[in-house]
Image: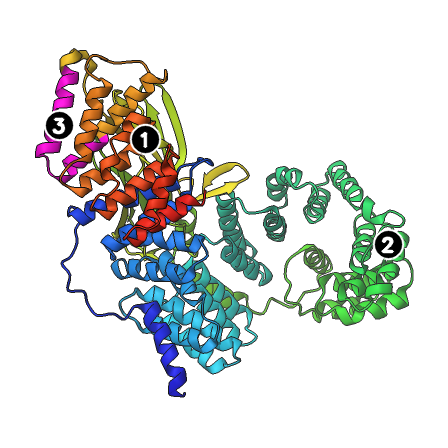
Amino acid sequence: MKASVVLPLLLVATVCLGAEPPSTAPAKTPGSAEGLAVASLVYSARSLGHLRDPSAVAQTGRIRVLLQYAERLWPDSVQTNRQLMDLYEGLGDPSRAARAGRQYLLARPNDYAVGLRWIRLSQAGLDRAEQRIELLQAVAADERFAKEIRAAAAAELSGVYLAQSDKGKAQQACRQALGLDPYHVGALEAMAGFGGQAGAVELLRNALTLLRANPRSMQSAWTVARLLQQGGLYSESLDYYGHAYGISRARRPARKVMEPFLTDYFNAMLDAGLTAEACEQFEPLVKRYGWSLALRALMVEACRALKKDDAAKEHTDAMEEIYKPLSAPGARRSGEQAAELAWFYLAFKSQPKVALQWAQEAAGSAGNDPFVQRVLGAAELAAGKAEDGLARLMPLAAKDPHAALRLARYYLSTKEDDKARQILKKYDGKLRGGMGWRELAALAADNKMPLPPAPDVEALRGVLKQEPAHVLEMGLAPERFVTVNLTALRGELAVGEPVEITVELENTSTQPVPLGRWGLFDPVVFLSVSVNGQGKAELPNLVSVPLPAPKYLAPGEKVSQTARVDVGAAEQLLADRPLADLKLTVTAMVDPLQAGQEMFSSVPDLKVAPVTIRRKPLFDAAGGQLAARYALGYIVRDLRQGDPPTRLRAARQTAALLAHVRRVEMGNAQAVFPEVLTKPVLLSMTRAFLQADSPLVRAEMLAALHQVPLDRRIISLMGGRVEDDSPLVRLRLIELLAGQRTPGHEGLLDLYAKDSDELVREMALVLRKK
């Protein structure tokens, strides 16, 4: 490769992977001034993002600038980079999203979900295959990241090579992926494809491996079940059909998935001879999927076998009603649809002449289709055109059980038992289940004419016996393997203190637990909050908490994430009630899915105990005016003598009291000790915070005033901050005044559009746009 080509590729890898010298700057901590400022900015951005208010001014732009300022203060902040990745991806800027994702992963290299997103985002701007190869090779070799993330890059690399028709390198990349992650689904499927046409035993091994990779995969369990059913292991197949069905009841897949699955499951029960049980289990399901011709056809078969002729006729009549629009004169039909009509009138209505008419129509447009040939031959045979029917069915009989059945039945009716025996003897079709097979097997048994045995029964059974016992249990009952717990960082909080919840996922079993898209469930928890005290409020699905989980959670391993739930509407609700004794109850839903307007958990039996927090009032009203005076005194003391976190809390408490007084003025709240909680006193306290020696305190006071209905007297307090030395304070000031569209904010926007600080200018720009 030429040097002129190599250099750009190396630059791509450097930009995406971040090969940079170690920083010599002192490490920042959450309790440092920068850490507190970053926490405030990130919280403001997060709360603004949760605000479901279409009237919010420049919501996305403000979030972006707040996070960019946080990034400036602490480039390695995990929380900042996680939110920036989400933000930039949503804004259609994959390059910046990838950069933020990489910074995040350097701190949390096992977060598999973020790792997959980062790999995808890093490739988004690469047009040439050589660039993608260079990038993916670098990721796959980078030992800073979890093996499973590197495996995903190697599997992606295999796909690039395949697109170039380089099968050798594609296989090599797949082997690399499986060396890093033996259960990478994409690599497993690709390797199976490289091997060419696999036999039944190898197909079963592959399917069981995929099920071990994700025991909660309905599709993998279904595939195993079908392979066992087709191989003649009917009872064993029911274990896996039942497993898949149990998963479907929790995950609620679409009807287009459920109908063919239920058809296969019904067939398997009939194959196993459980006709009465199948009829009982599937009768309510057939009512739910009443338009399904396949399910109704099986109900006809089952009811006839159980001598329930009236019930069978009911289902047959329903099928005829479903077919009516298709069979109406002038209706547009494909050849296959005409063949379906022919089969219905032949197999279910016993009207061979009508069936032959439909079959002949089908042959006119799809005569070479094997299904059409089978239907036409069977109709000809039943309608008395034996020579044509025999000639048409004979080439199909070795593989198609329906064709073999019709031929054997005809020869038995003409006393040509040897010919019938030969038809049965030559049947070598892989299909060992379904309606045609059952009738063929019954005919052979009734006439003591053996069918060839299924060729791989014992080998399939041997493979199945090697499967670990825990796989199916893990898939159906994840709650026996993992727990999810909520913990409040503090059970009692003062006004202005953050409401923080830690979500912890723990593997309580002796087996590694797969998580994520190809695992038992996505490690994402939705938190809902209910607030009691001075009324009741419900805030469902308020906060999404993605856990920084690896792909496989090892036995005994825990992973946790702390999140604030006082965001969006909850922030406003708490700020509105500084004098109320509030009880907050936080509940959780693991891996939420949505069906219409309903939210539900994909693992409904994985229960999470709620956690309760008390948010104490700023003072006890039973203490009278003295208690109120003491509360104000404590706030002033905290401003003068407190450590940085205490001073920030005092600023938020002052804003909460000022908001209360303003709501009283506006007639939206009842006054409490108005002789003490007066507007002049609170304005004076607000001024003191805005004039504090620490820019961190001044900025926090401005941030807290977002919850206050501003008027001219409050706005006038901020005049001294217009030319504040701190760009953080100026940023907070313009966001507050222009964000609330206060009188005169246009002039401030003009001023700050020329500010010396780039991000202050950017905030002015985004607030000018709306």
- Left or right: where 125 falls relative to 362: left
The amino acid at mark 2 is Ala
Of the two numbered discs 2 and 1 on the same chain, state the one appearing first in sequence.
2
In the image, which is nearer the foreground, mark 2 or mark 1?
A: 1
> Can you say which quadrant of the picture contains the C terminus?
top left
**Residue annotated with mark 1:** 707
Q: Residue at x 38, y 58 (%)?
A: 97
Question: Distance between the Cα atoms at labels 2 and 1?
Answer: 75 Å
Instruction: Name the secondary structure under disc 3.
Output: helix
Q: Residues within 10 Å of mark 1 (few under 14, many from 20)?
A: many
Instruction: Name the secondary structure under disc 2.
Output: helix
**Residue annotated with mark 3:** 636
Question: Distance between the Cα atoms at labels 3 and 1?
Answer: 20 Å
Looking at the picture, how far across and down is residue 64, in whole percent? 36, 50
Q: Which mark is residue 355?
A: 2
Of the two numbered discs 3 and 1 on the same chain, state the one appearing first in sequence.
3
Looking at the picture, how far across and down is residue 672, in whole percent? 25, 14
Proximity of marks 2 and 1: CB atoms separated by less than 8 Å: no
Nearer the observer, 433 or 583: 583
Q: Which residues are magenta?
A: 627-652
Question: What kind of secondary structure does the magenta stretch mostly adopt?
Answer: helix
